[in-house]
Amino acid sequence: MKPNLHLILITLIFSQLIQSQESIHAKLIDSTTQKPIPFATVELNKKSGVITNGNGIFHMHLNRKSTKKDSLFINCLGYETKRVAIQKFTDSIIVLSQKSIELDEVLVSNKNYTIEEILEKISQNLANNYDFDFTKSKLFYRESYLTNILKNNIDIKKSTIPEFSQKFVDSILNIMPKSSDNYTEILGNLYEKPIPNNAQKLDIIKASNLYDKNNEITFEGLEEKFNAIFRKHVKRDSYFKIKSGWFGTKEEIDSSLFGDEKEAKEVEQTKELIEAQKKKERERKKNFLRYRKGSITNLEYSSFIYEDSHLNFLEKSRRYDFELLDYIFLNGNFVYKITFTPKRKEDFKGTIYVNTDDFAIVRVDYENVKSLKKFRLLGISLNEYLKKGTFIYSKNNADKYALKYAEVEMGSKFGIKRPLKIIEKNKNTKGRRKQNEISTDIHFIVSNITKKELVVFENESITEASFNSYTEKAKVNPTYLPKYDPEFWKGYNVIEPNQAIKDFKSIE
């Protein structure tokens, strides 16, 4: 009987462990259009929850066994709030119905305000509506950085160095990756008081960095190849004349190129620039916590509730045209749906959703109407053509509005199209000073897309003593992932990854 008793006990314990943490995975769709519903709030018992991703999908983990009292509450702009009992949850698809609103229904307890009056009340209530005191937020942050080389041509017109042939340059260009993806994900607690002292502390619970290490070493490998060629052909006391179009400069040879550290000269401007970029990259990896804390707070502080935000439609409202379009239903409240468009030189247009009771902006969607930065000069071009995003706010335990979700996507293109000539000269050589010459035409176009997503699962007010008592960990490093691992975030609530992340895998 003993073995059977042991078996029964093991089975009971195992089943209890399985049931102790449940997982809910579903997709929200519109009952009429059957289209997915992004950015919907899915909360457990109206206390903590997640946000659906761009495809309307969410994944929620429960840290305990559910009870009959546990329910999901699902809210989204324009839809009826839906309650789903967890123990009766069986479908992978949840259908939401749009909320129909009669104008008289809104005006029962609200005066028919003009746009000017609504904007004035938003500004008057700004300091009281939003939480600017000490808070603690449990959050998940994802930053996606996507690079694509749209064009990379180098035509060798003349080269006195045999190794620097068109064939060699083409071989280098061919092995250079045409695209590179980098995904950083962080789960943690942010302690902060944004106004007036902008104090933040970040407790990273878990973090990952998904990228291809093969792309990371490409630059260092190419640099060594070029240095080996120069060491073979270039004299120690030579200098370079570099010409590109109308401009020319003189560059002394760095004697460390030949392995002679004692005779190494001061690194000139070009090399200093390269080293600065390398240092920035090393710092980004070395001090992961400080760098990513800055990214998270910069995203948060780009919202309209802070001064000097790029979303200045409240601060400089006279520069915009506003239009009241409709009334929408959200979290049991009615909201005004108001659009804003720039009159002249401002950069963004968008839509704000304003609670009709307290005049808090609970959501803003925006996008740029023109390039944010654009220039073309002597073959160098830059076009910051894209910046769009969403901010969503909900009330915390102090009955103040705090950030629930933020998303910003930015896009830019950088190009170089110009001739480049490098001439080696040596004043100590008898006869002609010119030793070697490389003449090329270069044409590069690189596209970058950066997407930042932040979801706050829980936000609570804390005391100054609680803020001061927490000490950041001295050194936190993310876990490197060469490919997407669905087990890495198992048991944690995060933003459901998109298909590009799920399909990511380093090239062997």
Image (spheres, rainbow, N blue to C red):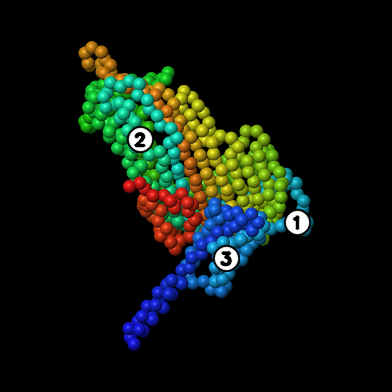
Question: Splitting the image into 4 quarters, where does residue 116 fall?
Answer: top right
Query: In this view of the protein, can residue 123 be seen by the observer?
Result: yes
- State the residue position of label 3: 72
Q: Secondary structure at mark 1?
A: loop
Locate residue 256 relative to residue 150 in the image: left or right. left
- Pinpoint residue 252: horizontal percent, then vertical percent: 30, 23
Q: Secondary structure at mark 2?
A: helix
* Residue located farthest toward the bottom when viewing the structure as drawn: 1
Label 3 or label 1, whichever comes before in sequence order: 3
Residue beneath the point at 30% across and 30% down: 168
Query: In this view of the protein, can residue 399 be seen by the observer?
Result: no
Residue in the foreground of this view, choosing between 210 and 43: 210
Residue in the foreground of this view, choosing between 369 and 257: 369
- State the residue position of label 2: 174
Tell me how far mark 1 sits from mark 2, CA to CA.
Answer: 63 Å
Query: Label 2: how many residues lie within 10 Å, few (<14), some (14-19) or many (20+)?
Result: few
Say what amino acid the circle numbered 1 marks: Glu
Say what amino acid the circle numbered 3 marks: Leu
Label 3 or label 2, whichever comes before in sequence order: 3
